[in-house]
């Protein structure tokens, strides 16, 4: 697979088992590097733990690595995390409104549909985990000596 077909995030190995490597990735918003971020309060960063199923004997806790996913995997994840829920929410509100329901009833129904969707998604997490695969590579640290 070519490198331009992958999306990578740098992280630090937190835990290593025989079957998996757990990596801590710090996600930052686009404005995290702004010098005024403390004044506006819009910048945010969140730590995420990603468990990659692969032999862990190549990695050590504290080691800097890059976690990769293919662009196809990223699109698949976006579809199930954002596109489908948005369509369910809008479609339910539209259908309830067209049926003559009050706005409060339409809102409760749409949230109920979303709750049901996420429960079904959770129950199928193993199946989805087989489709969305991550890989881990050690970072190449090169030192420039003059």
Image (cartoon, rainbow, N blue to C red):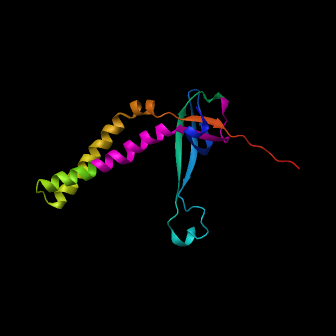
- Give residue 66's quadrant in the image: top right
Q: Main SS type for the magenta part?
A: helix
Location of residue 74 in the rendering, given as x and y in whole percent from the top left corner: 47, 41
Of residues 100 and 120, the one drawn nearer to the viewer in this rendering: 100
Residues drawn in magenta: 58-87
- Give residue 119's quadrant in the image: top left
Relative to residue 144, is residue 104 depicted above or below?
below
Location of residue 3 in the rendering, given as x and y in whole percent from the top left corner: 61, 38
Relative to residue 106, is residue 131 depicted above or below?
above
Relative placement, left or right, of 95 versus 140 is left
- Give residue 141's quadrant in the image: top right
Relative to residue 63, is residue 96 depicted above or below?
below
Residue situated furthest bottom in the rendering: 39
Q: Is residue 79 magenta?
A: yes
Residue situated furthest right in the rendering: 146
At x 50%, y 40%, the residue is 71
Location of residue 38 in the rendering, given as x and y in whole percent from the top left corner: 56, 69
At x 57%, y 51%, the residue is 26
Task: Please identify the quadrant where the N terminus is shown.
Answer: top right
At x 67%, y 35%, the residue is 60
Q: Is residue 63 magenta?
A: yes
Location of residue 101 in the rendering, given as x and y in whole percent from the top left corner: 12, 57
Relative to residue 1, is residue 31 depicted above or below?
below
Relative placement, left or right, of 74 versus 20 is left
At x 53%, y 43%, the residue is 49
Relative placement, left or right, of 66 versus 102 is right
């Amino acid at each position: 697979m070519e490198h331009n077909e992958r999306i990578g995030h740098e992280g630090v190995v937190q835990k290593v088992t025989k079957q998996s490597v757990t990596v801590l990735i710090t996600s930052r918003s686009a404005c995290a590097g702004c010098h005024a971020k403390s004044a506006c309060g819009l910048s945010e960063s969140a730590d995420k733990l990603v468990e990659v199923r692969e032999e862990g004997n190549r990695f050590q806790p504290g080691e800097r690595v890059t976690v990769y996913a293919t662009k196809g995997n990223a699109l698949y994840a976006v579809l199930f995390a954002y596109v489908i829920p948005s369509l369910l929410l809008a479609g339910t509100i539209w259908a309830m409104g067209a049926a003559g329901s009050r706005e409060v009833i339409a809102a409760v129904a749409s949230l109920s549909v979303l709750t049901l969707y996420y429960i079904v998604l959770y129950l199928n997490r193993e199946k989805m985990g087989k489709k969305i695969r991550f890989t881990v590579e050690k970072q190449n640290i090169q030192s420039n000596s003059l």
